[in-house]
Amino acid sequence: MNTATLPGPSPSRRSFSRWWDQMSIYLPVLLMMLLALASYWLLRATPIPEEPGPKPEVTHEPDYFMQRFSVKVFEPNGALKTELYGTAARHHPDVGTLVVDAARVRSFGQQRQLSTATARQITSNDEGTVFVLEGNAAVVRQAGQGANGEPLPRLEFHGEYLRVSTEPEHIMSDKPVLLVRDQDQITADNLDYSGDARVAVLTGHVRALFAPRP
């Protein structure tokens, strides 16, 4: 019986096979090297973030303006707390104040008693709790009822300078003032009024004009 012998691989193929077997051993190492080189290249190509520069100096120059505006502040339950009107306003960031020209402030205190403040210029802090009224200043608190139902008379404060705090309610002035309570009128050089106690302390040249009682 005749048999046939298949030819074996050529010397060149055997040499390539041995070379490939040797290279396959180092292939993972080569891949890791390529990945490391790629990561290094990406790191070099990524721009370095700039370090934050010094904060700009806060100056007295206004950082924003408003013209013929109205600003409203509401209570957490949605009730109107304060409303500010003005023809022009400038905010000074260094002292945290808002200066309003031809201003009017409407605010609601306890028992929703309405108070209105007007002046040629009103300066308020950022929290809206302190108002400095200058020039033909007036604060008018409408008549109402106290927490216990007692009647509260209408009160008016007039002068060239009034400083009003809302928490708690406090009005003071170191310049001549006029206090009007219903139909009674009192003038003085200085005023210190506490809204919680409903007590006004007037000093200096005090003059009072009381309307006749029924």
Image (cartoon, grey):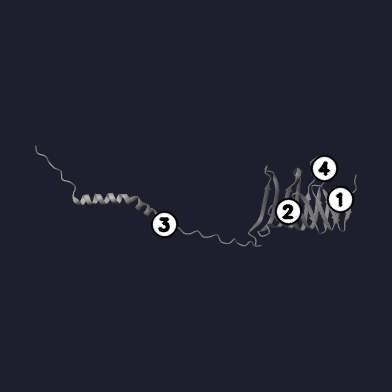
Q: Amino acid at mark 1?
A: Asp
| Quadrant of the snapshot with the C terminus | top right
Q: Amino acid at mark 2?
A: Val
Q: Which mark, residue 184? A: 1
Q: Position of residue 41 (x, y in %)?
A: 41, 57
Measured Cα–Cα span from mark 3 to mark 1 = 87 Å
Measured Cα–Cα span from mark 1 to mark 4 = 16 Å
| Quadrant of the snapshot with the N terminus | top left
| For marks 2 and 4 on the same chain, the one whose residue lies earlier in the sequence | 2
Q: Position of residue 42 (x, y in %)?
A: 42, 56
Q: Residue furthest left?
A: 1
Q: Which mark, residue 40? A: 3
| For marks 4 and 3 on the same chain, the one whose residue lies earlier in the sequence | 3
Secondary structure, mark 1, is strand
| For marks 1 and 4 on the same chain, the one whose residue lies earlier in the sequence | 4
Left or right of 193 on screen, residue 80: left
| For marks 3 and 2 on the same chain, the one whose residue lies earlier in the sequence | 3
Q: Amino acid at mark 4?
A: Pro
| For marks 1 and 2 on the same chain, the one whose residue lies earlier in the sequence | 2
Mark 2–mark 4 CB contact (< 8 Å) = no
Q: Nearer the viewer, residue 175 or 36?
A: 36
Q: Which mark, residue 151? A: 4
Which residue does the image show at 79% across and 44% down from the upper left?
144
Q: Which residue is denoted by mark 2 in the rendering?
A: 130
Q: Amino acid at mark 3?
A: Tyr
Q: Position of residue 109 (x, y in %)?
A: 75, 46
Q: Nearer the viewer, residue 203 or 27?
A: 27
Measured Cα–Cα span from mark 1 to mark 2 = 27 Å
Label 3 crowd (10 A; few <14 / some 14-19 / many >=20) = few
Q: Position of residue 169 (x, y in %)?
A: 77, 49
